[in-house]
Every structure is written in C-alpha cells, then in structure tokens.
Image (spheres, rainbow, N blue to C red):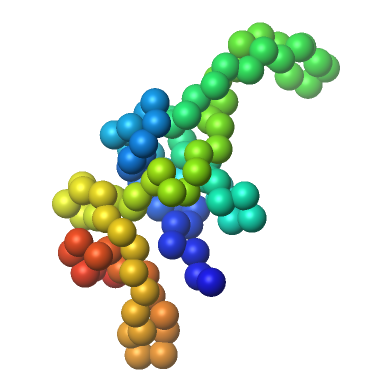
Amino acid sequence: MAAKLKKGDKVIVLAGKDKGKTGQIASVAPKDNKAVVEGVNIAVRHTKQSQGTQGGRIAKAMPIDLSNLAIVDRNGKPSRVGFRMEGDRKVRFAKTTGEVI
C-alpha cells in the first residue's frame, strides 16, 4: 500500500500533548506506524559524555503515531490524503482542496 504521509511533508498533530502544533516529518517507520516530526513530541534524554559527543540533557524528537497526524493543505488546515491516477501516475492529493501534494 502506498504511504499517505512521507518524509518532508508538513503535518499537524491531531491528538496528544502537542495537539495543534505543526512540523515537518523527519523520518517515517511504516512497520511501526510511527513518524518523527521536527519540534513535536520532544523528550529530554540524559546522556553520558563520550569521546565524540558532549554529555548532558539533550532534547530529542520522539516518534508519534501516524493516526495522530494530518497533512496541512495550502490553506493551513488539516486534510486527509487521497490517491488518484493522473495519466499513468498515481498521485496523492489533499481531500479538502483537491490539490496534488
């Protein structure tokens, strides 16, 4: 099945502690049904100093479930993603505006 949300898409969070925040998808794990969104679902990790890295409290974006994300259309509103054929190519489009993503 084709992916509705991909790396680089601008999304909005629909549920959870960061509801209403927007960000860009940094990575997607389709097997786990999760995605990492920049600036959303931040957790502080305490890391020990090693030879190559500085130690301390490091903020890290944690994965969020794909069901809690919606793509942002050109109007800045959350939208569902649909698929259609344009010629011989299958393309994703925003259901609110009908515009190709």
Residue 101 shows up from this direction = no
Q: How many marks?
A: 0
Q: Position of residue 49 (x, y in %)?
A: 76, 12
Q: Residue furthest bottom?
A: 87
53 or 11, which lies in front?
Answer: 11
Q: Position of residue 64 (x, y in %)?
A: 50, 39
The answer to whether residue 9 is left or right of residue 7 is left
Residue drawn at (78%, 21%), measured in percent from left and top?
A: 52
Image quarter of residue 80: bottom left
The answer to whether residue 37 is left or right of residue 54 is left
Residue drawn at (76%, 12%), measured in percent from left and top?
A: 48
Above or below residue 12? Residue 79 is below
Q: Residue furthest right?
A: 51
Q: Position of residue 27 (x, y in %)?
A: 55, 47
Which quadrant: the C terminus?
bottom left
Above or below residue 23? Residue 47 is above
Above or below residue 20? Residue 66 is below
Residue drawn at (34%, 79%), measured in percent from left and top?
A: 84
The answer to whether residue 8 is left or right of residue 51 is left
The answer to whether residue 6 is left or right of residue 73 is right
Q: Position of residue 18 (x, y in %)?
A: 37, 29
Residue drawn at (35%, 50%), measured in percent from left and top?
A: 70
Residue 31 shows up from this direction = yes
